[in-house]
Image: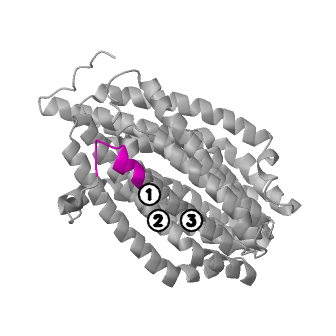
């Protein structure tokens, strides 16, 4: 465990964020490798994988519940130097991860296929989407235990093992993708199913590496079979913190699903272009996400150690770092989006949609970074409900205008992207306002109950 309650805060954030960003970059490259080879199969294949992959946001929403709850409780325990509480939370998170994985497989193999067919642009896209999802569901189920283990490491200030695991699995996936998708060396191309199989194998290897690390090198928390019996009090605390964060991702899923539904009338090329643009966007936003993810355990340990002064300083430092990085990326994507998308398709119409999407959405990169940071700070405080409210504001600012505009004469996809920019800006404004309100409320509670924030210790 690394003690994040002492020492320079920006150094802690950068020390955690740098390997996290590298690992997340490789994790995104893991999707790009699939996208590159799937792109060789045509527009319908890209659109089918993107349509089925949209379900990953729903899985990420549930995974976020467990990951955030685990990270917050263990970071607070680390701040108190309470290894027993951390170990209990870790083992209970594994139990909940197993339950979530089983439910994902059951629901995916029953309702998931109907969902893909419902939002696909045409029959061929739906067929390929179902084929991909059938093999991709095991990878989705494996994300839960891996997320619990990675969140535990993040809570204790450890980021390097996560980076090593992600890099190793990406390298494996890069090797498997051409073999399974295109049939290199085997002469038996599996198409979109091969892309999903590569993901399954890579996730299995990642979990194996994580288990090895926890068994050999992790000392603050440990696996204990006697603690696998359901501990309802821990479940209540973990889910109480994590569910609002999961709902936040769930609202993102709703937003993306509505986009796919609106643009389906533009044909598979539009869905393929949006799919490419969305994947590239995920990669571009990684530095901002890494800074926010790094700030959460720094602030969380400070809260656990009764150091609200350091939590406030963490917010200021992460906003400054994140905004600088996101502004640079915004400039790149606004003026040269074609540099980032031309690798994934040879179709001019597909690339035009992807490039226009990135160039327009780039106007809200700084706002997105601020949203990530506010979300991380609410996690550190153990009160994630405001993040749902702020995300709900974004949904209200996006969905009604988007649906109205889509039925107006002369509707274009770029109008949809401008509405998204406006909605994200409102999301950032509301998130900051609610975080400042929460900080004032906590300060007033200290005065009302006769206590005062801890005196800052020397850095």
Q: Secondary structure at mark 2?
A: helix
Q: Report how far apart the C-alphas of labels 2 and 3 lie in the structure.
A: 10 Å
- Among the two numbered marks 2 and 3 on one chain, the one whose residue lies closer to the N terminus: 2
Residue ID for mark 1 = 146
Task: Name the side, left or right, on which 192 lies relative to 425.
Answer: right
Task: Tell me the quadrant of the picture where the N terminus can be found.
Answer: top left
Stretch of the chain drawn in magenta: 211-222
Query: Which residue shows up at 68% across the image and 37% down it?
Result: 329
Q: Secondary structure at mark 3?
A: helix
Query: Which residue shows up at 39% across the image and 44% down it?
Result: 153
Residue ID for mark 2 = 142
Task: Name the side, left or right, on which 33 lies relative to 400.
Answer: right
Front-most of residues 276 and 33:
33
Q: Is residue 38 above or below residue 106?
A: above
Residue 6 coordinates in the image, percent (x, y):
33, 23
Residue ID for mark 3 = 201
Question: Residue 406 falls in which quadrant of the image?
Answer: bottom right
Q: Report how far apart the C-alphas of labels 1 and 2 lie in the structure.
A: 7 Å
Task: Name the side, left or right, on which 58 lies relative to 86.
Answer: right
Q: Is residue 395 above or below residue 365?
A: below
Query: Which residue shows up at 66% across the image and 76% down it?
Result: 129
Question: Residue 437 falls in which quadrant of the image?
Answer: top left
The image's mark for residue 409 is: none
Front-most of residues 447 and 362:
362
Residue 397 coordinates in the image, percent (x, y):
55, 55
- Among the two numbered marks 3 and 1 on one chain, the one whose residue lies closer to the N terminus: 1
């Amino acid at each position: 465990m690394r003690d994040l309650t002492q020492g320079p805060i920006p150094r802690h954030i950068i020390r955690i964020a740098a390997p996290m960003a590298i690992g997340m970059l490789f994790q995104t490259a893991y999707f790009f490798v699939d996208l590159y080879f799937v792109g060789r199969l045509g527009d319908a294949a890209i659109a089918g994988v993107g349509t089925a992959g949209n379900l990953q946001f729903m899985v990420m929403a549930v995974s976020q519940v467990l990951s955030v709850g685990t990270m917050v409780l263990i970071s607070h325990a680390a701040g108190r130097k309470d290894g027993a509480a951390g170990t209990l939370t870790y083992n209970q998170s594994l139990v909940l991860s197993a339950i979530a994985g089983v439910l994902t497989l059951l629901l995916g193999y029953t309702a998931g296929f109907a969902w893909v067919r419902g939002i696909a642009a045409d029959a061929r896209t739906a067929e390929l989407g179902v084929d991909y999802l059938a093999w991709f569901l095991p990878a989705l189920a494996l994300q839960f235990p891996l997320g619990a283990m990675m969140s535990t490491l993040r809570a204790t200030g450890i980021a390097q093992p996560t980076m090593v695991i992600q890099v190793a699995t990406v390298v494996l996936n890069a090797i498997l993708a051409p073999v399974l998708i295109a049939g290199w060396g085997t002469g038996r191309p599996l198409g979109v199913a091969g892309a999903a199989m590569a993901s399954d194998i890579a996730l299995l290897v990642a979990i194996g590496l994580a288990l090895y690390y926890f068994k050999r090198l992790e000392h603050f928390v440990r696996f204990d079979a006697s603690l696998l019996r359901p501990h309802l009090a821990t479940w209540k605390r973990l889910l109480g913190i994590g569910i609002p964060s999961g709902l936040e991702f769930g609202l993102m899923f709703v937003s993306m699903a509505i986009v796919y539904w609106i643009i389906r009338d533009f044909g598979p090329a539009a869905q393929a272009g949006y799919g490419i643009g969305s994947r590239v966007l995920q990669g571009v936003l990684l530095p901002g996400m890494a800074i926010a993810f790094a700030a959460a355990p720094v602030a969380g340990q400070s809260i656990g150690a009764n150091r609200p002064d350091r939590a406030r300083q963490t917010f200021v430092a992460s906003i400054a770092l994140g905004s600088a990085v996101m502004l640079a990326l915004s400039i790149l994507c606004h003026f040269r989006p074609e540099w980032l998308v031309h690798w994934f398709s040879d179709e001019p119409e597909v690339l035009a949609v992807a490039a226009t999407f990135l160039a327009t959405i780039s106007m809200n990169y700084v706002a997105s970074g601020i949203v990530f940071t506010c979300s991380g700070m609410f996690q550190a405080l153990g009160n994630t409900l405001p993040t749902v409210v702020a995300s709900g504001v974004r949904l209200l600012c996006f969905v009604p205008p988007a649906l109205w505009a889509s039925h107006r004469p002369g509707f274009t996809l770029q109008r949809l992207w401008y509405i998204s920019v406006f909605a994200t800006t409102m999301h950032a404004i509301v998130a900051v306002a609610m975080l400042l309100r929460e900080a004032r409320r906590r300060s007033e509670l200290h005065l009302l109950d006769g206590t005062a924030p801890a005196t800052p210790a020397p850095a």
